[in-house]
Amino acid sequence: MPDAPGLELIRGEIERDRPGAVLATSFDREQAALIVDPAQLLAVLAWLRDEPGQRYTFLSSLHVADYLPAEPRFGVHYELLNRDRVERLRVKAMLADPGDGGLPAIDSCVELFPTADFQEREAFDFFGIEFRGHPDLTRILLPEDYVGWPQRRDFPVGGEPVTFTYNERNYG
Amino acid sequence: MAETPLLTEDRMTEIMTVNIGPHHPATHGVLRLVVDLEGEIVRECKPVIGYVHTGIEKSCEDKSYWKVIPFVERMDYVSYFFQMQAYCGAVEQLVGLEIPPRAKYLRTLFLELNRIHSHLVWLGTTALDLGAISMLWYCFRERDRILDLFEMATGQRMHTRYFQVGGVIEDIPLGFEQKCRSFAEDMPVRVGQYEALLDRNEVFLQRTKGVGAVSRERLLELGVSGPLLRAAGEPWDLRKATDYLAYPEMDFKIPVGTVGDNYDRYRVRVAEMVESSRIVAQCLDKLPDGPFIAEDRKYVLPPRSELSTSMESLIHHFKLVTEGFRVEAGEVYNAIESPRGELGCYVLADGSSKPARVHFRDPSFVNLQAFRDMAVDTYVADMICSLGMLDPILGGVDR
């Protein structure tokens, strides 16, 4: 992990070239996170990956959390790893729900990190986050014809009706 | 069988799309493969997953922290201790709970037993795919000894719910140490016997050597970790790279391969079993005395014996089993080395007694993306071999 001053240094370097790209930093429970502007996410990820002093070349995990009732509610997390220094850095992009059935959207990072392919599809599947530029953004774990985004916090547990074919056939 | 022969004009060159699975014994679970074949050669391959998706991550959001443990165990059903450790480690980091040394050693012991168990299941079933049926019985014989050990210490053979937030639920019983030690002594001998059966087996060697190789740069791009990556020559193991549990005090090696073909994958895992048995023996040798679970009654159940004498213990017990403990808002990503690679657990706490989000970065799920690179332009039979060597557990993939 970069420590808290190290995190501010990273922020400073990013800010020099791209003012406004980093919205905030957080250092909590020994874990460092950069909260970035979703519009400049790819630039920040590419910089962290390719800059000689950074080299966060391994994307460990990409996942989404729903911070309802906070606004913006969706956080897309990129857990980056520098394997030489064994340092982890979380990059977080917060997305608001556009409402009216529209999907929150963010650029896909598959070009930068091919490992994000399945994980972005999973995030789309469960949270309805649209990854712009993903080669094949379809549902991955749920059936293709499934309606709804079940990992969102406003989707109830047990929101899925259980169909009993026996009952339907005989009494339905 | 490694090189793909050039197709001559008189052969059929029409591409045929074939569906394999989801219910097929060679797919090691409910994995469906949509494969484009040119004759017998795979030209395109797409894994289709989700057949055993059970919404575990969603269900976890409705359970208090300690009730999540048995849920997450059931994701990757052959490496259940690892899921428990990833999750409990994340929660301990969230609440800032230090676990006692004895618990660290016990956890390490059971994780390594579980690693051997997982590799045994892999070796047995993969060798079975390649026609070495007897391997399955030998591997499952040893696996049964591990399950006996689990049963002895935890009461369950699988899905043991042994790790708790703060330590482990019970100390190991009398007689366990001796049984475990004899297993750790026998295991390297058994591994030698497996090697004698496979390493001079011409069919096995021809089916695995030079098949399904993927370069380490490509594997790293695809986020692959664990034995697959190590077989390609990258000595990356979170047990060495990061400090968790008792691993810093253990003496063990990281086996690595050279070219990253299926034979290297087999060699790396087999060598890991020997290293794991060494860790098991060291855990028993160095096992410190003291409590096996943290003292903090806000997170840890008081001992049963205190309940009839201490009102305070009774209150703590009542609070813990009814509401559970509350965790201050925050989020943690905790990664450990599972038998298949980096197993990460992300937990988001919102201040209540239930996690707001539990996400598992399952290594099988991520590693499966490398399958296309392994299988394309090889024979169908080699594709099955590569799939076995990839070692995906579909319960973990689909969650």
Image (tube, helix red, strand yellow):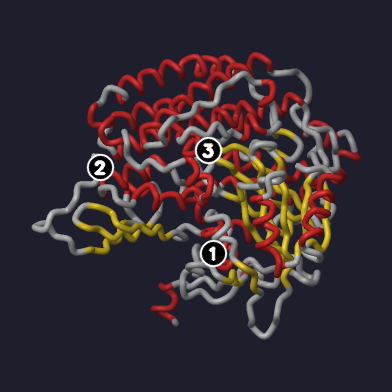
Q: CA distance from mark 1 to mark 2?
A: 34 Å
* Residue that lies at the very extreme toward the bottom in this rendered image: A100
* Secondary structure category for the residue under label 3: loop
**Quarter of the figure with the C terminus of chain B:** bottom right
Position of A76 relative to A60 (above/below) = below
The answer to whether B144 appears left or right of B115 in the picture is: left
**Which kind of residue does numbered mark 3 sit on?**
Gly
- The disc labelled 1 sits on which kind of residue? Arg
Kindly tell me whether residue B71 is visible in this rendering.
Answer: no
Say which residue appears at 40% left-offset and 32% top-offset: B264
Q: Which residue is mark 2?
A: B3
Location of residue A123 with respect to B362 vertically, above or below: below
| Same-chain check, marks 3 and 1 | no
Q: Chain of mark 1?
A: A
Tell me the residue that label 3 is attached to: B226
Q: CA distance from mark 2 to mark 3?
A: 27 Å
- Give the numbered dot on residue A121: 1
Identify the residue shown where x is 46% and y is 46%: B393
Q: Nearer the viewer, mark 2 or mark 3?
A: 2
Task: Identify the disc placed on residue B335.
Answer: none
Label 2 is placed on what type of residue? Glu
